[in-house]
């Protein structure tokens, strides 16, 4: 089950592939914060963008 945020993020990265590494970096940094890690499924985002 993906949230609307994740779907929008995937669509944006598909339209702008040059920003993929930046998005993965920001996702990894944000997931390290306790509150953000609960809200944003960082592992799902990083795995899906990396495929």
Image (cartoon, rainbow, N blue to C red):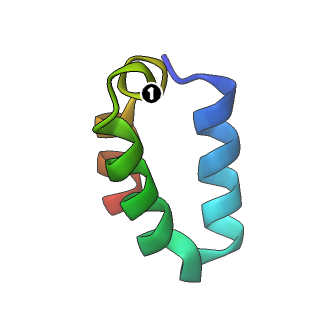
Is residue 28 at least partly visible in the picture?
A: yes
In the displayed structure image, the side of residue 45 where residue 10 appears, left or right: right
Q: Is residue 22 above or below residue 28?
A: below
Q: Is residue 23 above or below residue 48?
A: below
Q: Nearer the viewer, residue 6 or 37?
A: 37
Q: Nearer the viewer, residue 36 or 11?
A: 36
Q: Quadrant of residue 14?
A: bottom right
Q: Position of residue 8 (x, y in %)?
A: 70, 42
Instruction: Determine which residue is flagged by label 1.
Output: 36
Q: Residue at x 41, y 43 (%)?
A: 30
How many numbered marks are there? 1
Q: Residues within 10 Å of mark 1 (few under 14, many from 20)?
A: some
In the displayed structure image, the side of residue 51 where residue 35 appears, left or right: right
Q: Position of residue 38 (x, y in %)?
A: 39, 17
Q: Position of residue 3 (x, y in %)?
A: 60, 22
Q: Position of residue 13 (x, y in %)?
A: 61, 63
Q: Residue at x 47, y 28 (%)?
A: 40
Q: Residue at x 59, y 50 (%)?
A: 10
């Amino acid at each position: 089950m993906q949230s609307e945020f994740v779907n929008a993020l995937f669509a944006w990265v598909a339209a702008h592939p040059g920003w993929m590494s930046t998005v993965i970096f920001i996702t990894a940094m944000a997931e390290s914060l306790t509150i953000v890690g609960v809200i944003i499924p960082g592992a799902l985002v990083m795995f899906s963008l990396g495929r």
